[in-house]
Image (spheres, rainbow, N blue to C red):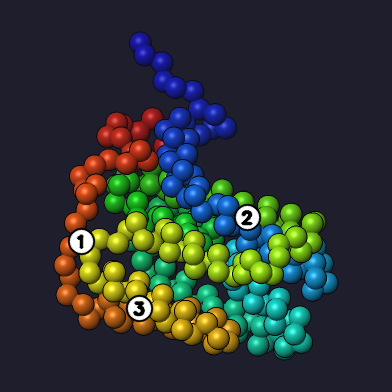
Amino acid sequence: MTSRPRAFLRIGPQQWSDTWAGIRAVAPLMPGAVLFGLAFGALIRVAGINAWVGNYASVTVVAGASQIAIVEQLRAGAPAAIAVLTALVINARMALYSAALAPVFAAFPRRWRLGLAHLMTDQSAVVTLQHAERWPDPVRRRWFIWGASGPFVAVWAMGTAAGIALGPVIPDSWQIGFIVPLMFLAVLVPGLRDSPALVAVAVSVGVVVLGRELPYGLNVLGGALAGIAAGAMVPRRAVPDDAAGGRSPGDPDAGPEVAS
């Protein structure tokens, strides 16, 4: 009789493998999350906000760009309503992620849908969409998504805590704010496979750069909307993919589920 592999922390070996695949997929973006967390933590300290509040925000809001915008608004003496409105405008893109991820999450139990939705960031959302079709089994898919989202948020929270503890250790000349769009492009570019996607990204980047002086992060929202509109008007034409048909190291195998 063949013995089954033992579970660790009540999680089966297959789930650990799928989680690790998700971590590997998002790992190249984690250093950027640490730097951005350091910047937000330092801003919390400079603004005189309670350290516990700053750390709590990073694990409950999980939206670095809007968190920085809120703190900057409050630091400038803006009314709380304006600060909240600014954050909502910046986070409007999450509605697009929600619509795109709904079919991916559809087969998950409610506790998984709610938990993973809370952990979604720009980076983990794009990684999830890029890899969803490679994980047709919903059980294995949700463990992959957990690996691509949970540890990334943990790294962001640790960066925030370090920034609060260390203060402003990152020079202003580094322009830390550009880390967010750079990380987004880093995960998006490998997934470009047709003409509408290429046009959408080109238009989005152009609008974001040209509108960088717009207040409240409106250049990001405008870039997203302009990219969607431009991509919708371009006929679909496949871009050659030298790796088509290949299996990446993070792809799941065809073997049976070990544990549920």
Graded by Cα atoms within 10 Å as few (under 14), some (14 to 19) or many (20 or more), the crowding at tag 2 reads many
Graded by Cα atoms within 10 Å as few (under 14), some (14 to 19) or many (20 or more), the crowding at tag 3 reads many
Relative depth, front residue between 91 and 116: 91
Give the amino acid type for the residue marked by disc 2 in the picture: Val
User: Which of the two discs, 1 and 3, labels the residue nearer the N terminus?
Assistant: 3
Q: Which residue is mark 3?
A: 203
Q: Which residue is mark 1?
A: 239
Whole-number angstrom distance, CA of label 2 to CA of label 1 = 34 Å
Give the quadrant of residue 97: bottom left
Graded by Cα atoms within 10 Å as few (under 14), some (14 to 19) or many (20 or more), the crowding at tag 1 reads few
Relative depth, front residue between 230 and 81: 230
User: Which of the two discs, 2 and 1, labels the residue nearer the N terminus?
Assistant: 2
Residue 52 visible (yes or no): no
Give the amino acid type for the residue marked by disc 1 in the picture: Val
Whole-number angstrom distance, CA of label 1 to CA of label 3 = 18 Å
Q: Quadrant of the N terminus?
A: top left
Report whether 61 appears left or right of 223: right
Mark seen at residue 34? 2
Relative depth, front residue between 176 and 174: 174
Report whether 249 appears left or right of 194: right
At mark 3, the secondary structure is: helix
User: Which of the two discs, 2 and 3, labels the residue nearer the N terminus?
Assistant: 2
Residue drawn 75% across the image and 85% down it: 76
